[in-house]
Image (tube, coloured by chain):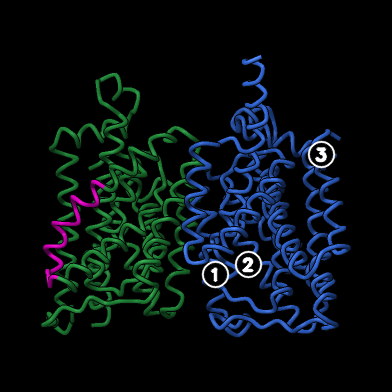
Chain colours: A blue, B green
């Protein structure tokens, strides 16, 4: 295991100690931090490793949320519903991926973007199952106090984050990760030397959707009410990209740190400028892409180069 | 009779869809950038028409004349200041960047105009004409005529003017265009400006027909996506064909399986088209 992966895993394990000294607010923030980290790390498998500009994160987040939400409102236990949401997302994404991932560049970007619209409209119109535009109320859990609840959802989300981290590390060191890197660099050449690119890409797409779907499921149980415009929000697709760009594409540790930095920025902005928060997010995106296109991880090496030059 | 009405509605709406999509298609074709600000430009154009009518009682037809140069300048500046810096970057970067710009513009509109829906109501209203039992509102008909005129003007610019030929040259072969002495950065800015101007004018026309709110920008963007993919990129006639096809499918879909499913249908069609025929109906040709 590389050094950065050891650091990555250590950070994730350290996060688990949060309930020991955090109040309800810290737990809420911690749950969101875990969720963002799951989305960003998952996106990185397709967007960072394979280099496919996927905007489908929100589609699978919403799909997972609704799968879990519908199951929970039918009195299925959460321990069953969340894994089902994850597995269903995997199967759906892998089979959709087999068709969509034949597209490249802009075409793939739009196709993945329009998946969100398709899913949202389908959920909107399946009123009997999902409540349509009215949204879906999800029954409260056992309800044994605010802190117990907060801790429970934090630990669940953290569990998915741990699983995501392990998946990312395993993929990074495996034949799959190597194949994805080959696809990013030159797909035609990778195909020519006998790499089954379609299979690799579909599995990667499925894996990236799987944990996103599970996170969506926990999110649904956590907030107790979801509606299509909330969980199929395109921002769930864009935020992970921004996080990955902040941290530096392709590096899981960078992506994780990017997610935390992003959450910090968002929290400060939300608290102070609620009316213009999405505009501030836009400014952040523009500045980031113009002035720091290789992310925070590149600052260190740039500083190092600068210092060497000026010794 | 119902069939004739559906057909006429589709033709009218299709020309408007083409007008929404054509600037988007131009930018995508020439700059290879998916311009996610397009929807917000359209809404901004609609607000311009609404504001001018509300404050000065200026008819939307005059608003068109004001919107075109104004939006051209806006687009030109955005391209010069921001987008030209990353124009050679991968898709992900340009796409995310225009999304960021869109967030800024859209949030600014929500801040200044609020998210309420508004409607530009002409007084006196224009009424409607009916011919052989097919009814068409006059404002819709006029908007369609203007939309057609706008697409016609773009066609002429690309066909007849030197700058238009330069745009087509850059689209067909950037490197060869540079060798022929075309200033690519400036052409990019002009093309983006044209795209923005068309979006602004489309917005003015939309204000006549649909309610205005910053929240509708993504719907316009979605239509532009579908029309572009259906018709083929960067082709004026392709945008027209795509617009009419989309309107027809939506119309027939609404009439047969219910209006709630029209959007789903169009997006599913989009995905199917992307997979089976990504070059669109009219194939990969220049601006014709």
Which label sits in the foreground, 2 or 3?
3
N-term mark: 2 or 1? 2
Q: Is residue A162 above or below residue B97?
A: below
Magenta segment boundaries in residue numbering: B56-73
* CB under 8 Å between discs 2 and 1: yes
Q: Locate residue A288 relative to residue B211 in the image: left or right.
A: right
N-terminal-most mark, 1 or 3: 3
**Residue tagged 1:** A120
Identify whether A147 is placed above or below A210. below
Q: Name the residue at 84% across, 60% down.
A: A18
Q: Which sits in the foreground, A74 or B111?
A: B111
Quick one: SS at disc 2?
helix
Task: Identify which residue is drawn at 82% across, 83% down.
Answer: A143
Give the CA separation, mark 2 to mark 1.
8 Å
Marks 1 and 3: which is nearer the front? 3
Check disc 3 and report the residue beneath it: A5
Task: Answer left or right for B225 relative to B150.
Answer: right
Rendering coords of residue B274 (x, y %):
47, 51
**Are the residues flagged by discs 1 and 3 from a single subunit?**
yes
Disc 2/disc 3 C-alpha distance (Å): 29 Å
In this rendering, does residue A102 appear at all? yes
Q: Earlier in the sequence, mark 2 or mark 3?
A: 3
Considering only vertical position in the picture, is A253 above or below B8? above
On the image, the x and y values in percent for residue B260 come to 45, 78
């Amino acid at each position: 295991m590389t050094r950065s992966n050891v650091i990555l895993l250590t950070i994730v394990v350290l996060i688990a100690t949060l309930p020991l000294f955090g109040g309800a607010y810290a737990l809420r923030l911690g749950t969101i931090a875990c969720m963002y980290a799951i989305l960003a790390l998952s996106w990185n498998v397709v967007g960072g490793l394979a280099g496919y500009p996927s905007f489908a994160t929100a589609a699978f987040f919403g799909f997972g949320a609704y799968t879990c939400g519908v199951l929970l409102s039918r009195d299925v236990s959460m321990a069953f519903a969340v894994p089902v949401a994850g597995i269903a997302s995997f199967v759906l994404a892998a089979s959709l991926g087999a068709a969509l991932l034949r597209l490249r560049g802009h075409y793939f970007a739009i196709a993945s973007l329009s998946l969100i619209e398709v899913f949202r409209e389908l959920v909107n119109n399946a009123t009997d199952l999902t409540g349509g535009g009215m949204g879906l109320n999800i029954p409260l859990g056992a309800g044994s106090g605010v802190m117990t609840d907060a801790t429970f959802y934090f630990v669940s989300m953290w569990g998915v984050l741990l699983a995501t981290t392990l998946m990312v590390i395993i993929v990074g060191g495996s034949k799959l990760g190597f194949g994805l890197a080959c696809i990013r660099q030159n797909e035609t050449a990778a195909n020519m030397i006998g790499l089954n690119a379609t299979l690799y890409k579909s599995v990667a797409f499925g894996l990236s959707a799987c944990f996103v779907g599970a996170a969506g499921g926990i999110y649904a149980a956590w907030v107790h009410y979801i509606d299509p415009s909330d969980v199929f929000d395109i921002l769930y697709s864009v935020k992970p990209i921004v996080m990955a760009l902040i941290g530096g594409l392709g590096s899981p540790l960078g992506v994780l740190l990017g997610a935390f930095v992003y959450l910090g920025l968002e929290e400060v902005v939300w608290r102070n400028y609620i009316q213009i928060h999405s505009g501030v997010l836009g400014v952040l995106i523009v500045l980031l892409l113009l002035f720091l296109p290789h992310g925070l991880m590149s600052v260190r090496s740039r500083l190092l180069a600068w210092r060497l030059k000026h010794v | 009779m119902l069939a004739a009405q559906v057909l006429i509605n589709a033709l009218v709406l299709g020309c408007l869809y083409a007008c929404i999509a054509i600037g988007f298609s131009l930018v995508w074709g020439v700059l290879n950038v998916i311009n996610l600000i397009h929807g917000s430009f359209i809404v901004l154009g609609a607000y311009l028409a609404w504001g001018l009518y509300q404050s000065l009682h200026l008819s939307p037809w005059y608003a068109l004349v004001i919107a075109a140069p104004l939006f051209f300048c806006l687009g030109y500046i955005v391209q010069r200041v921001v987008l030209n810096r990353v124009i050679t970057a991968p898709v992900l970067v340009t796409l995310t960047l225009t999304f960021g710009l869109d967030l800024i513009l859209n949030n600014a509109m929500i801040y200044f105009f609020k998210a309420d829906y508004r409607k530009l109501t002409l007084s006196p209203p224009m009424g409607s004409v009916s011919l052989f039992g097919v009814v068409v509102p006059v404002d819709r008909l006029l908007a369609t005529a203007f939309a057609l005129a706008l697409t016609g003007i773009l066609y002429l610019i690309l066909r007849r003017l030197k700058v238009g030929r330069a745009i087509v040259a850059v689209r067909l072969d950037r490197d060869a265009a540079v060798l022929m002495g075309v200033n690519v950065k400036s052409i990019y800015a002009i093309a983006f400006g044209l795209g923005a101007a068309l979006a602004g004018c489309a917005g003015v026309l939309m204000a006549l027909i649909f309610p205005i709110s910053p929240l509708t920008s993504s719907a316009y963007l979605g239509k532009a996506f579908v029309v572009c993919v259906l018709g083929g990129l960067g082709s004026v006639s392709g945008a027209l064909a795509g617009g009419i096809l989309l309107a027809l499918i939506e119309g027939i879909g609404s009439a047969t399986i219910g209006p709630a499913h029209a959007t789903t249908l169009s997006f599913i069609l989009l995905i199917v088209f992307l997979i089976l025929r990504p070059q669109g109906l009219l194939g990969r040709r220049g601006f014709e």
